[in-house]
Amino acid sequence: MLTSCVMALCKFTVSFNCNPRISPLCDRRGRLTALLFSSLVLSVAVDSKSFADPTPAIDKALASCVLEPGPVGTVSRIIDAETIAVDDGSDIRLIGALAPRAFDASAKPATWPSETAATAFLSELVLGRRVRLAFGRGPRKDRYGRYLAHVYLAEAGTQHWVQGALLSAGWARAYGLPGHFDCATELIAHENDARRARKGLWAVGVYRAKPAARPQALMRSRNRFERVEGVVASVARTASGVYLNFGQDWRTDFTAHVPKEILKLHPDFAKALDQFKDARVAVRGWIERRNGPMIAITDPSQIERLDATNSPIVGSNSPPRPNASEPTRSLQPDPLKPYIDDDANKNLPDGPTETRPGGLDL
């Protein structure tokens, strides 16, 4: 009965206090705090639950960034920079925040400074402290039995977002897995602030955006998570989906592929892709070899238009269209420079206020 009443209050609150940065279902009146407020109110109903008894499935009617509060526990061990263990033996993967690893630089395990620094930061932040899990719409556990959750410090009445802290400090990159792209806009916004300031891993050349114009270099990043930037040469529609081609020869040049299943799930995004020809675009994801290097798109948030003035809304997790009076901004003016110049990102301009973080980190 209590849960039903609280859920009704959450729906009422979201309907009147919703942030367009987090969901396109909202209007532009800047209604921000109720998304987390709704979750905090709902937590009253689930605070007594244990890790063996997760909270009910998320209400599909709520906005995409509303997370379902879960159980509380004390962090007993730091497994790595994106995985923690709690006092009942459960492991939790910090979904949405990809930690640096030695593999990123082909270094030996436990020798990569970015990895050890990120692990130390996470340890200082959460080890020995009480945390609350929060779940999105995807599966709550992976094949290894780890919880896939957003994590909040839950002490003295505070609810600080651990993923947001890692991203803002520059010790993680924003990413998603199929079914786990909730709050992608907020994750990317926290990452963008750290990237502009060259904090943490962003001071290391390995993690700078890679130019689409260098497909051979991209092939050396095969099976690694990368952010690739370049100008779309052509947009091709086939029976399997849409290809964004970043060169004249799709057999060798970098390509982003949007499968037909994703197009059906995001019809506005599917229509907007036709406008991407000659647009400057950033694509994030794991590099695969499909003829040339390719990134498979499983959510619209993986593609960002950098020529923001005329950028359409391209998916459920994308920020609103900037005001037409704003000047065009590009995070990387020269597609080759960040690959060869360590100071390429030194003086990047701030992005539009709509893409700045804040919606979850209360």
Image (cartoon, rainbow, N blue to C red):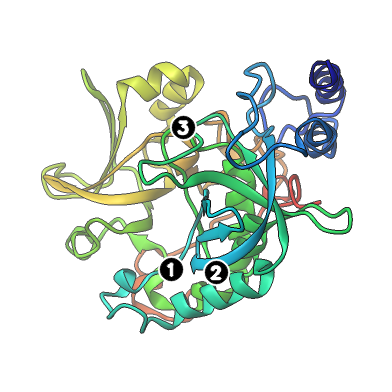
Amino acid type, residue under disc 1 in the picture: Pro
Q: Residue at label 3?
A: 179
Q: Residue at label 2?
A: 171
User: Is 191 or 2 nearer to us in this picture?
Assistant: 2
Image position of 86 (left or right of 216)? right
Residue 264 vs 123, above or below: the answer is above
Quadrant housing the N terminus: top right
Image location (x, y in percent) of residue 336: 34, 67
Query: Distance between the Cα atoms at labels 1 and 3?
Result: 22 Å
- Verify CB contact (< 8 Å) between mark 2 and mark 1: yes
Query: Which mark identifies residue 79?
Result: none
Between disc 1 and disc 3, whose residue precedes?
1
Q: Crowding near pointer 2: few (<14 within 10 Å), some, many (20+)?
A: many
Q: Residue at label 1?
A: 100
User: Is 330 or 128 nearer to us in this picture?
Assistant: 128
Between disc 2 and disc 1, whose residue precedes?
1
Image position of 63 (left or right of 196)? right
